[in-house]
Image (cartoon, rainbow, N blue to C red):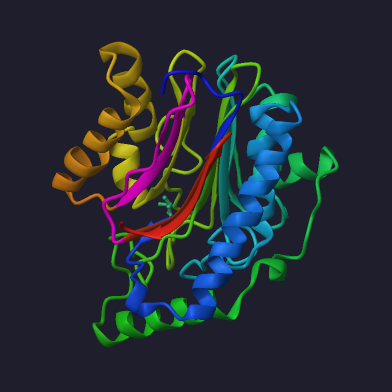
Amino acid sequence: MDTKPPYAIAIHGGAGTILKENMTEEKESAYLAALDTALSIGETVLKNGGSALDAVEKTISYMEDCPLFNSGRGAVFTHDGKNELDASIMDGSNQMAGAVGGVSTVRHPIVLARAVMEKSPHVLLSGRGAEQFAEENGLEIVDPSWFYTEDRWNSLQKVLEKENQNGKTGDASPVINSDHKFGTVGCVALDSQGNLAAGTSTGGMTNKRWNRFGDSPVIGAGTYASNDACAVSCTGHGEYFIRYSVAHDLWARVNYLGESLETAADYIINQKLKEKGGEGGLIAVDKNGNIAMPFNSAGMYRAYSKPGEREINIYKE
Ligand code: ASP
């Protein structure tokens, strides 16, 4: 890109086995409309001179309320039939970051992650302590049933049935969603001040247990932002994204090796991670407003915009 745009934004709503042949027209339109609305929320903030951080928080808050995505309402269920939510946010202008893991009563985990960043001396809070911090800071608290959706509940029942048939209860391996759709949400943005921000929010993976966290609340794995290079949000099989520090790895390749965002992101997702069996994708924006959205699964709910360009996609081209 020759000239740096005044703003740029990208979002994802999860990657996985998302195939056109398995999608009804109705469902596809619902996803496209939700992505469109989410993107518009972030665009409006940025067009009005708002911060990348606000754009990320507001966009993700909307997606957390949308039952189509695996974050907030619509989150997947744990083995014990609960919704345990993880989220993180990072401010590229000052390397500040906030994250929460395993919360069940906070309507907007992304807002809580930002509160952790701005109002606590810590980066990552979990479980009951994180919820207490939310209460003390006046965040919206809901009954855990707020997050319930029939679809996700049925997904859990299917996985449990399979486990029972195979006599596999107690299996220690992470269980990927039965439908192989991850559904996590994320947003990255560049604002008119040249600041970058990234955020990610998820219910994790269906049938997760033992208070498992994936990459989404781990700074450097699922989320990373630094004004000197880029902002990144990931989605996919979290254990791999943690092991390979995917979000930070992308920043490092761009910053230290001088690779283009696209080259670096494509290498990490379509070579490095793919060779290891790590399924998923990421969205990223660099300091010049370039955007990359690679994924190695069948599809990824995704969208981006900058002045003069706007796209919403689900499947591989
Ligand atoms: N990365 C998330 C996790 O492992 C799942 C996802 O992206 O859908 O918890």
Instruction: Judge whether 50 appears above or below 184 on screen.
Output: above
Q: Is residue 214 left or right of residue 47?
A: left
Residue at 31% over, 49% down: 295
Q: Is residue 297 magenta?
A: yes
Residue at 17% over, 40% down: 271
Residue 47 rendering spot, x and y as whole percentages: 71, 32
Q: Is residue 95 magenta?
A: no
Image quadrant assignment for residue 114: top right
Image quadrant assignment for residue 173: bottom left
Residue 22 rendering spot, x and y as whole percentages: 36, 79
Residue 87 rendering spot, x and y as whole percentages: 57, 44
Which quadrant of the rendered structure holds the C terminus?
Answer: bottom left
Image quadrant assignment for residue 269: top left
Which quadrant of the rendered structure holds the N terminus?
Answer: top left
Residue 215 rendering spot, x and y as whole percentages: 42, 43
Q: Is residue 294 left or right of residue 44?
A: left
Q: Closest to the observer: 86 or 279?
A: 279
The magenta span reads 280-298
